[in-house]
Image: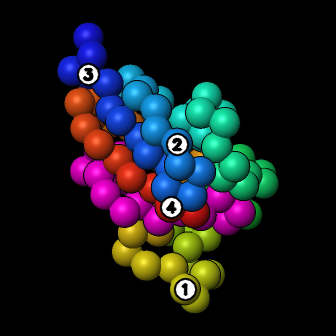
């Protein structure tokens, strides 16, 4: 089973946790004790914007809510995502996040 787990590192908090496919990044933050800030938890406010440093291929694609909110943020990059909207869609990987 361990080969299906994905290692998620949250750089700012010096945290790493192994989680199964299907887990959301919001769940990862809650399980690990991360300080990623969350506001609405529904992809409307942009409070939880993060940068995917590595492992984008293990995450769900950018959805319409993310596209809309990120388009209002002048300093967003191609690696910017809303952590409340992302889900791990492929196990056995490595994801590195920064907020």
User: How many angstroms separate mark 2 from mark 3 (CA)?
Assistant: 20 Å
Q: CA distance from mark 1 to mark 4?
A: 15 Å
Name the image quarter holding the N terminus: top left
Task: Please state if 53 lies on the left or on the right of 73 as rendered.
Answer: left
What residue is shown with label 3?
Answer: 4
Residue tagged by mark 2? 15
Q: Position of residue 66 (x, y in %)?
A: 53, 62
**Bounds of the magenta span?**
46-65
What residue do we see at 43% from left, 79% from top?
77
Q: Which mark is residue 75?
A: 1
Measured in 3D between alpha carbons, the distance from the residue under mark 3 to the one under mark 1, in whole angstroms, is: 34 Å
Q: Which residue is mark 4?
A: 98
Residue 17 drawn at (x, y percent) = 46, 32
Decide: marks 3, 4 in contact (CB < 8 A)?
Answer: no
Residue 9 badge: none
Foreground mark, 4 or 2, reads 2
Q: Earlier in the sequence, mark 4 or mark 2?
A: 2
Q: Secondary structure at mark 1?
A: loop
Classify the position of the C terminus by image quarter: bottom right
Mark 2: secondary structure: strand
- What residue is at 40 percent from the left and 28 percent from the top? 18
* Secondary element at tag 4: strand
Foreground: disc 2 or disc 1: 2
> Is 1 on the left-hand or right-hand side of 38?
left
Q: Quadrant of residue 70?
A: bottom right
- Counting residues from the N terminus, which is met first, the one under dot 1 or under dot 4? 1
Identify the residue at image location x=57%, y=58%: 12
| Residue 25 visible somewhere in the drawing | no
């Amino acid at each position: 089973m361990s080969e299906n787990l994905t290692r998620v590192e949250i750089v700012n908090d010096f945290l790493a946790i192994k989680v199964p496919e299907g887990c959301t990044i919001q769940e990862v933050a809650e399980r690990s004790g991360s300080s990623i800030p969350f506001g609405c938890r529904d992809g409307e406010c942009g409070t939880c914007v993060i940068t995917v440093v590595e492992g984008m291929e293990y995450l769900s694609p950018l959805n319409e809510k993310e596209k809309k909110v990120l388009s209002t943020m002048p300093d967003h990059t191609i690696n910017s995502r809303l952590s409340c909207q992302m889900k791990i869609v492929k196990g056995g990987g490595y994801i590195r996040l920064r907020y």
